[in-house]
């Protein structure tokens, strides 16, 4: 039996100081993987979930400085690959010219204009295809994507020549050029990777979450294959079992406790993580993944955690071990900035029309019932901040008192109100208010919240304090994003669905957010508003 010292936090990691207490735990002396995982279920006081940091607070700490640091890491890693592609373009042009010079005259199409055009096309297409920086990409996948890009470029060049009356005897030049490119680009990339992988500035620092035999094996494999572009800098776990540490390959700092993950990520500027799910109980893996994505824009997981409710965006092969990749786009600077730009631009474009509509609706509200035309209500926004959400007033001024009286007279409706915060034939809603709600026009003033950055066009509906308990484990996910005017719930039945379905839609949106998903929801919203699907 071996005694292991475990540090258990008394204060949460989100506070400035963390107080720890020592817990001595006995483990069988064994280095097998089964042993390293078997003790995890029996160590209740060192549960991983009990020692996690607050994801919303951690995501709020992603300042502009961290955005810039992460982008610099990516681009420093991508630049050598870009330069290798440009070298391959030049060599391909030279070889193609040499072949044609042997069998005839030098083609006039091989000039500097075409070379620059090819460089621009190749770099742009590779960027869109995810071939920069191509860190951790499987070689077969990289070659397949390159073949598509180069094939598309060859086809465009041939089509351009035919459309502009090019010399037919030079049509074979472009396929020949493509063959040279397809051979030279992968070779050039491999050469440049080997040349730069020894430098500290190249690659993405990576933290392995979960020790044990598998965690140490992943660490060793990454160390042995630096051309992948992932550089392991630390290992964290719920406890620090010294008995599984290989002195030759362990990190200099040993195995750190789990709650140190955000600190280590900031210290090493490590924005990539690998989660070894077998080192944690199955019931905790979803929570672990949701929490780790508040630290790492790129997170790889072992296949035993694949039922994580997320759309995996790639894979990393370490010999015979395949890891699934999740991209946390909420931490991707470009994606977040693009989302904000779309929100502001859309509001500015529709503002002349919206101001006219809002003016007319405000007049109708004032003429049909006493009270102000607009109504604002405190809701919970991103990171738990209270925001004032604006709407066209659709209820009578004394709505709260009327609700209490109505529920007292109809106690059978109280449970439905507490469950979904909606009432059929709500007596508080005015005549014009029913029309506004049916057409969702009452929510148009929230475009002002969008312009101010308190809300987004797409996101979870902003909730009130009373709804926090209903969200339970999904609430930390809700706090990560800016609430929206429309979302997955609104385009999938809205009020015709259950409140539990609404919560699951919010969780799915946060876990799988992307700009493309936002555009899809906006398109679906137009159809939903026209058909009044799920409105009440």
Image (tube, rainbow, N blue to C red):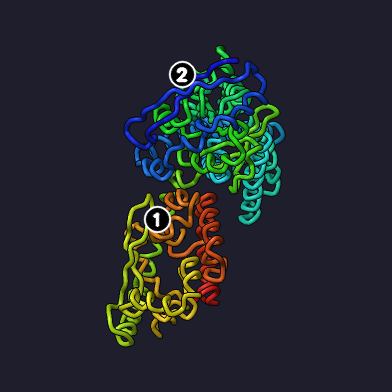
Circle number at residue 253: 2
Quick check: 48 above or below 33?
below
Query: Horizontal and vertical percent for residue 410?
Result: 46, 78
Crowd tier of the residue under label 2, counting other residues whose Cα lies within 10 Å: few below 14, some 14–19, many 20 or above: few
Query: Horizontal and vertical percent for residue 328?
Result: 50, 44
Is residue 478 toward the left or the right of residue 186 in the image? left
Local secondary structure at mark 1:
helix
Quick check: 347 above or below 364?
above
Is residue 414 toward the left or the right of residue 313 in the image? left
Instruction: Evaluate whether residue 106 shows in this view.
Output: no
Crowd tier of the residue under label 1, counting other residues whose Cα lies within 10 Å: few below 14, some 14–19, many 20 or above: few
Looking at the image, tell me whether mark 2 or mark 1 is earlier in sequence order: 2
Looking at the picture, tell me which residue is in the foreground, 383 or 48: 48
The residue at 63%/35% (across/down) is: 302
Identify the image quadrant of residue 370.
bottom left
Quick check: 121 above or below 268?
below
Query: Horizontal and vertical percent for residue 348?
Result: 35, 65
- The alpha-carbon separation of the residues under discs 2 and 1 comes to 42 Å
Question: Mark 1 sits on what residue?
Answer: 341
Instruction: Evaluate whether residue 79 shows in this view.
Output: yes
């Amino acid at each position: 039996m071996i005694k292991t010292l475990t540090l258990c936090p008394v204060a949460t990691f989100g506070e400035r100081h963390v107080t720890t207490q020592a817990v001595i735990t006995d483990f069988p002396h064994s280095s097998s993987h089964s042993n390293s995982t078997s003790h995890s279920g029996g160590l209740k006081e060192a549960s991983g979930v009990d020692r996690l940091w607050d994801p919303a607070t951690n995501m709020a700490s992603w300042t502009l400085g961290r955005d810039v640091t992460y982008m610099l890491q990516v681009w420093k890693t991508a630049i050598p690959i870009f330069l290798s592609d440009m070298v391959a373009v030049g060599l391909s042009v030279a070889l193609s010219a040499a072949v044609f010079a042997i069998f005839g005259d030098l083609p006039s199409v091989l000039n500097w204009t075409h070379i620059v055009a090819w460089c621009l096309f190749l770099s742009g297409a590779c960027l869109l295809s995810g071939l920069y920086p191509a860190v951790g990409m499987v070689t077969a996948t990289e070659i397949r994507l390159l073949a598509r890009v180069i094939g598309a470029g060859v086809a465009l060049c041939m089509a351009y020549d035919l459309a502009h009356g090019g010399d037919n005897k030079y049509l074979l030049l472009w396929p020949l050029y493509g063959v040279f490119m397809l051979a030279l680009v992968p070779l050039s990339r491999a050469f440049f990777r080997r040349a730069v992988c020894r430098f500290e500035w190249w690659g993405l620092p990576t933290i392995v979450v979960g020790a044990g035999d598998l965690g140490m094996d992943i660490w060793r494999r990454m160390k042995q294959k630096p051309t992948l572009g992932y550089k392991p800098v630390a290992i964290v776990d719920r406890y620090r079992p010294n008995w599984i540490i290989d002195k030759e390959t362990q990190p200099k700092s040993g195995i750190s406790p789990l709650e140190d993950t955000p600190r280590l990520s900031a210290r090493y500027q490590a924005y990539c993580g690998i989660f070894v799910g077998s080192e944690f109980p199955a019931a905790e893996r979803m929570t672990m993944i949701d929490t780790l994505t508040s630290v790492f824009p790129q997170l790889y997981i072992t296949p035993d955690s694949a039922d994580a409710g997320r759309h995996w965006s790639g894979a990393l092969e370490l010999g015979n071990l395949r890891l699934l990749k999740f991209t946390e786009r909420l931490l991707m600077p470009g994606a977040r900035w693009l989302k904000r730009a779309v929100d502001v631009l859309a509001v500015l474009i529709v503002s002349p029309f919206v101001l006219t509509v809002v003016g007319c609706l405000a007049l109708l509200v004032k003429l049909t019932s006493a009270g102000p035309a607009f109504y604002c209500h405190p809701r919970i926004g991103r990171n738990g901040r209270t925001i004032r959400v604006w709407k066209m007033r659709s209820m009578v001024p004394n709505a709260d008192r009327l609700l209490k009286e109505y529920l007292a007279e109809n106690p059978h409706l109280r449970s439905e109100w507490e469950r979904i915060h909606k009432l059929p034939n709500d007596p508080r809603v005015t005549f014009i208010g029913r029309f506004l709600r049916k057409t969702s026009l009452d929510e148009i003033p929230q475009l002002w919240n969008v312009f101010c950055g308190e809300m987004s066009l797409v996101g979870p509906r902003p909730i009130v304090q009373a709804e926090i308990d209903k969200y339970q484990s999904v609430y930390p996910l809700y706090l990560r994003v800016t609430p929206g005017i429309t979302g997955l719930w609104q385009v999938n039945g809205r009020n015709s669905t259950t409140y539990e379905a609404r919560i699951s839609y919010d969780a799915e949106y946060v876990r799988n957010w992307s700009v493309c998903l936002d555009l899809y929801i906006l398109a679906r919203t137009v159809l939903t508003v026209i058909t009044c699907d799920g409105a009440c």
